[in-house]
Amino acid sequence: MSGTVKPITSLSETLATADALRRGTGTQLGDIIVTDIYANAEQITQKVVRRSRETARSWDQKLDDIVTSRLFGYPIMLALLGVIFWITIEGANVPSDLLADALFAFQDQLTIWFTAAGSPAWLHGVLVLGLYRGLAWVVSVMLPPMAIFFPLFTLLEDLGYLPRVAFNMDHIFKKCKACGKQALTMCMGFGCNAAGIVSCRIIDSPRERLIAIVTNNFVPCNGRFPTLIAIATIFVGGLFAQQFETLVAAAVITGLVLLGILTTFAVSWALSHTLLKGEPSSLVLELPPYRPPQIGAIIYRSLIDRTYFVLKRALIMAAPAGAITWILANVYIGDSSVLAHMADFLAPFGHAVGMDGFILLAFILGLPANEIVVPILLMGYLAAGQMTEIDSLAELGEILLANGWTWLTATCTMLFCLLHWPCTTALLTAYKESGSLKWTLLTFLIPTVLAFGVCFLVAQTARLLQLV
């Protein structure tokens, strides 16, 4: 052989060059390698891909230039989120009322059967007025919004938009030393935090997966929306003309969701610098092409895999909660029920955080299912022995105002509802996914401490400034 062979650059020299580039630009080493791989792949494909495919790719790229840009990406995400909330709120009202009427009518039939069978009053109370009525509340309040929200969410997923959401938010999560895929688990949490926690399996890093599990609670789930929507409509939407109430309520809910997302970033950053120290992993995400939705697949995944799964778990948790709540409301010590005594005990703590004892007790007893918080609250305010049904938000507003609610009460209740502990279903799911009692306990404690702390600061500041 004649001549000399040019030596191949060693791996160590290549890594040293990449590391120098990382130090100069602040880019992660993994990102540099992946970017180089895709750049080389693009050069190769340009030599073999035909013109028609280039045109199709160019159309995708033009759309991606808009939905993934720093200027338009976030406004588009917030606008889509607001539209989904508006459709969910507006579309769930009628089916929720119809479902409630049907389920509570069947309750009357159950009462007839129990009476005919000669059942004691306490058994009828526990099983019908407690257990069944609680389940009826959960189904009527939870099922219609889920049946609307999950298909809309799955539609965005099927269209190929959700990976763009992860792409947009990746750099923010990297600053928090978390993973961009956490954006997808957050989106799933809007339907149900338990489903969001399960979806954390897509995150490869155990450290980043734990961050996503612990912080998923800060996006409000479907069970918390009824409480947030009712309060926002009464105390904020009520200040505007009737035709704008729903629109204003949707805007308020979107603002609360944005606050929840900011809280997720803050807590993720804190965990990454304390209990879960580490460097963020690189998000290697190939954006899929935009494609027409498959209606059959959307219906199956949204209604069977998600709605049915979430509703089943919620019912299992809510059933004993309804029975226990009825017992507390119907067992008396002196002239007051056990429920009233518990509310009196919690009153000082509730007042310190801008609420009252009955509100705090409703959240505590609503641990198995957030959907029953408002019914428990009404049960306490009206001194009724069973979960009370109301005919309109106007009637609910009159009850709340009669029991001393102000703008501060409404604000602190919404903040507490947004930030407080996960429901039992989410906690059990967190234990199953993390396999750790320690991290399950922290999944409960971190939002609890944060909720009390934020509400305390808001309440005391408002009182100090004599705003109430």
Image (cartoon, rainbow, N blue to C red):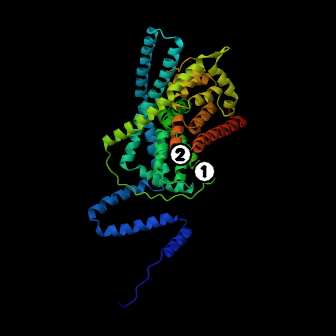
Name the quadrant containing residue 299: top left
Q: Is residue 58 left or right of residue 203?
A: left
Would you say residue 89 is visible in this rendering? Answer: no
Which residue is at a point 52% across and 18% down the rendered structure image?
126
Residue 95: horizontal and vertical position, in percent? 40, 27
Q: Quadrant of residue 423?
A: top right
Amino acid type, mark 1: Leu
Amino acid carrying mark 2 in the image: Ser
Which residue bears the numbered disc 1? 271
Residue 382 vs residue 110, the one in the foreground: 110
Residue at the (49%, 45%) spot, across then down: 186
User: Which residue is drawn at the image coordinates 65% and 24% (left, top)?
Assistant: 342
Q: Does the residue at mark 1 contact the one at mark 2 (Cβ under 8 Å)?
A: no
Residue 131's x, y, as percent? 50, 22
Residue 132 visible here: yes
Disc 1, SS: helix
- Disc 1 crowd rating (10 Å Cα; few below 14, some 14-19, many 20+) is many
Q: Which residue is mark 2?
A: 434
The CA span between labels 1 and 2 is: 16 Å
| Front residue of 266 and 364 | 364
* Residue 383 % position (x, y): 60, 17
Callout 2 crowding tier (Cα within 10 Å): few <14, some 14–19, many ≥20: some
* Image height of 153 relative to 290, above or below: above
